[in-house]
Image: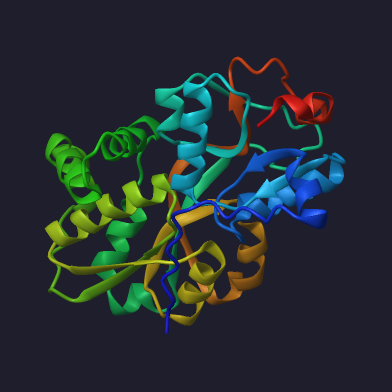
Amino acid sequence: MLVVLLTGCILLCGCTGEQSTQMQKGKIIGIEPGAGIMQKTEVAIQDYGLDYTLVSSSSAGMASELTKAINSGKWIVVTGWTPHWKFARFNLKYLDDPKGIYGGEEYIGALARKGFETDNPGAYVILSRFSWASDEMASVMLAIEDGKTPENAADEYIAAHPDQVSSWIGSVKGDGSLVTVGYVLWDSEIASTNVLKKVLEQAGYTVKMVAVDAGPLYQAVSTGDVDCTISAWLPTTQSTYMDKYRDNLVEVGKVLTGAKVGLVVPDYVTIGSIDELNSVKDKFQ
């Protein structure tokens, strides 16, 4: 049975004893505990010797803290990734990562359970064809951030890109069978999974979306609890999960290339590298 993990607020530690000391240090505002980028950031804190506390939050919580800081001109460092609407809304930059903790260029991949291609070849074909560019995904994310529901933003994208949708569907005609798609609660994956859902429905399938954290998502695909996902950030960000479950799932294809993860700051922050963070720790909120 899958547990849907909903996170919507920042989890801050208390303010006494050792935790109080930690809260006086610089903070890196993160997302859900256990996410690949959080694991990499824990490694970065250790390998760079950063005197910072990694604060668990959510994708929405991180973006909210970033927005508040920028609106008040404060320094903030967050776990970030592209594509994401925040890069269209704000002037941001990645801090250089000379130790290569966060890896180089990433791609977002499609994974499926073993046997999915045999059980549902038409849906598998659509999954294998589903690929788009960063600016296309970002347009859906920005529409959602501007107030549209994910479903409406996906409908609008599909209506505006009929040729692209036709290339994904081709001659596939679904039989109404259920396709269960797992995803993580990142803005990018909310956008892309809602678009995929609409495409599969247009092709004649019934679609159920299931939101889980990254680790449970890989496990769910490997055990067949969900049929597929387009939320795999590889080869670095979610490498721990991929290495663990690789033998029990199928790599279908690349949904998006040119993705990136790392530590992100507003452009007005005067440092340019992770290894400079300690020297300006007191400037960060």
Please state, as top left, top right, bottom left or bottom right, where the C terminus lies in the image: top right
In the rendering, at what x and y percent does residue 77 appear? Answer: 64, 33
Q: Residue at x 45, y 55 (%)?
A: 231
**101 lies left or right of 260:** right
In the rendering, at what x and y percent does residue 9 appear? Answer: 48, 53
Q: Is 144 placed above or below 227 here? A: above
Whether residue 41 is visible to the viewer of this picture, yes or no, is: yes
Which residue occupies the foreground of this view, 52 or 246? Answer: 52
In the rendering, at what x and y percent does residue 167 appear? Answer: 22, 45
Q: Is 164 placed above or below 119 here? A: above
Residue at the extreme bottom: 1
Location of residue 135 by image quarter:
top left
Q: Residue at x 15, y 68 (%)?
A: 174
Location of residue 85 by image quarter:
top left
Q: How is the image coloured?
A: rainbow
**77 lies left or right of 151:** right
**37 lies left or right of 130:** right
Please state, as top left, top right, bottom left or bottom right, where the N terminus lies in the image: bottom left
Which residue occupies the foreground of this view, 162 or 209? Answer: 209
Q: Is 122 placed above or below 261 here? A: below
In the rendering, at what x and y percent does residue 126 appear? Answer: 28, 58
Location of residue 185 by image quarter:
bottom left
Q: Residue at x 15, y 45 (%)?
A: 155
Whether residue 237 is visible to the viewer of this picture, yes or no, is: no
Q: Residue at x 76, y 31 (%)?
A: 274
